[in-house]
């Protein structure tokens, strides 16, 4: 079974303060309504666009999504 995007992105938590992926992951962790079990790009993208905190920009989500897809192929 494929790991959720949330669980994948958590590995970036606690990184350097100026690391945009770490900022995204920390903010994602703090948002209690983040869809933690989701694996669908469309559903996650809608959440990011409509409900996410400003510290979770779509460009960073897109970058993390690419890593997520690559990681899922392994």
Image: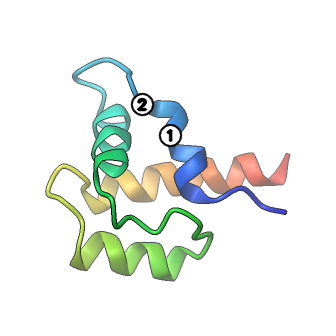
User: Which corner quadrant of the image does residue 11 belong to?
Assistant: top right
User: Which corner quadrant of the image does residue 40 belong to?
Assistant: bottom right
Horizontal side of 71 relative to 46 (left or right) equals: right
| Residue corresponding to mark 2 | 13
Q: Residue furthest top?
A: 16
Q: Where's residue 74, x and y in %?
A: 85, 45
* Residue 48 or residue 33, whichever sits in front: 33
* Residue 66 or residue 28, whichever sits in front: 28
Of the numbered discs in the image, which one, if any, rests on residue 26? none
SS of the residue at dot 1?
helix
Q: Where's residue 69, x and y in %?
A: 67, 57
At a point 57% along the width and 54% down the height, the residue shown is 66
Where is 41 relative to 3, above or below? below
Q: Do labels 1 and 2 touch, CB within 8 Å?
A: yes
Where is 34 relative to 26, above or below? below
Q: Residue furthest left?
A: 54
At a point 51% along the width and 44% down the height, the residue shown is 9
SS of the residue at dot 2?
loop
Q: Where's residue 48, x and y in %?
A: 31, 69
Within 10 Å of disc 2 (Cα), the crowding (few <14, some 14-19, many 20+) is some
Q: Where's residue 37, x and y in %?
A: 59, 66
| Residue corresponding to mark 1 | 10
Where is 14 relative to 74, above or below? above
């Amino acid at each position: 079974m494929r790991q959720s995007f949330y669980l994948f992105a958590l590995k970036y938590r606690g990184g350097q303060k100026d690391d945009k992926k770490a900022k995204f992951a920390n903010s994602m962790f703090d948002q209690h309504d983040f869809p933690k079990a989701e694996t669908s790009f469309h559903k996650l993208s809608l959440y990011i666009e409509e409900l996410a905190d400003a510290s979770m920009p779509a460009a960073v989500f897109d970058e993390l999504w690419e890593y997520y897809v690559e990681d899922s192929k392994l």
